[in-house]
Amino acid sequence: MNELSALAQAICHVKETEVKTLVKKMIEDGVPAMEILDQCHKGMGELGIRFDSGECFIPELIMAGQILQKVMDELKPLLVNADQPKKGAGCVVMGTVKNDIHNIGKDITVTMLRGSGFEVIDLGVNVPPEKYVEAIREHNPLAVGMSILITTCYKSIAETVEAIRQSGLRDKVSLMLGGAAASDLLARKTGCDFFGATAVDAVNHAAKLAQQKA
């Protein structure tokens, strides 16, 4: 097992000391910060699957979130212009859908998008459809990212897409779907344009949209 997959496993099984040791060594070895965050994202995805199957519970999710926040704090200085979007890079709206209060995958994606030069409007968690609509009207983003960690919130995705459609804004944005409970099939069924298995996928998709608009 290489160090990157070891990190994902350590996150998945909520091993704080191991995560800290691996991240420290990876930084020393010159592994890019975004690559480290991507592996953390994969680990959280696996943890979400364990949660859905009853192998772990809310306390583990909370602990993993706290561990990951420490990792993000340590890596933030290594992310180029993390809080200073490059002019013209474009805007992306991000949020976790209604009735889902998990923020980890979303927060990783937000950090990586900002590190890649995008302005990111972070709507938080448990975001109702109308809040997405308001953000699109106000910020005119290239894309809207919806995160989902638990399967019971599938309906919230469809409701959000429908609200955006009824507002007349559907053709103005690319709708991205991600998170442990997301899939390409779910994205297509709910009317989203893109499924991102990892935060890197979301960044790459946003970059393509920015290039097309340039």
Image: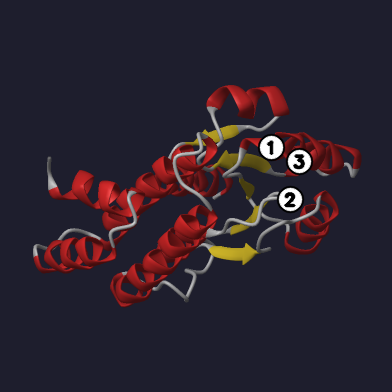
Tag 1 residue: 152
Would you say the residues marked 2 and 3 are in contact, meaning their CB atoms lie under 8 Å apart? Answer: yes
Amino acid type, mark 1: Thr
Labels 3, 1: front one: 1
Q: Position of residue 189 (x, y in %)?
A: 69, 22
- Number of residues whose C-alpha sits closer than 10 Å to that of mark 2, classed few (under 14), some (14–19) or many (20 or more): some
Query: What residue do we see at 49% from left, 53% from top?
Result: 105
Residue 145 location, x and y as percent? 61, 48
Q: Nearer the viewer, mark 2 or mark 3?
A: 2
Residues under numbered marks 1 and 2 in contact, where contact means CB atoms less than 8 Å apart:
yes
Element type at mark 2:
loop
Q: Residues within 10 Å of mark 3 (few under 14, many from 20)?
A: many
Is residue 182 toward the left or the right of residue 8 in the image? Answer: right
Q: Amino acid at mark 2?
A: Asn
Q: Quadrant of residue 209?
A: top right
Q: Which residue is mark 2?
A: 99
Secondary-structure class at tag 3: helix
Q: Position of residue 151 (x, y in %)?
A: 63, 35
Q: Which mark is residue 33?
A: none
Q: Residue at x 22, y 44 (%)?
A: 5
Q: Residue at x 59, y 39 (%)?
A: 177
Q: Which residue is mark 3?
A: 156
User: Front-most of 210 and 40?
Assistant: 40
Asked whether the viewer can see residue 117, the reply is no
How far apart marks 3 and 1 lie (CA) works out to 9 Å
- Quick check: 85 left or right of 64? right
Residue 139 in sight: yes
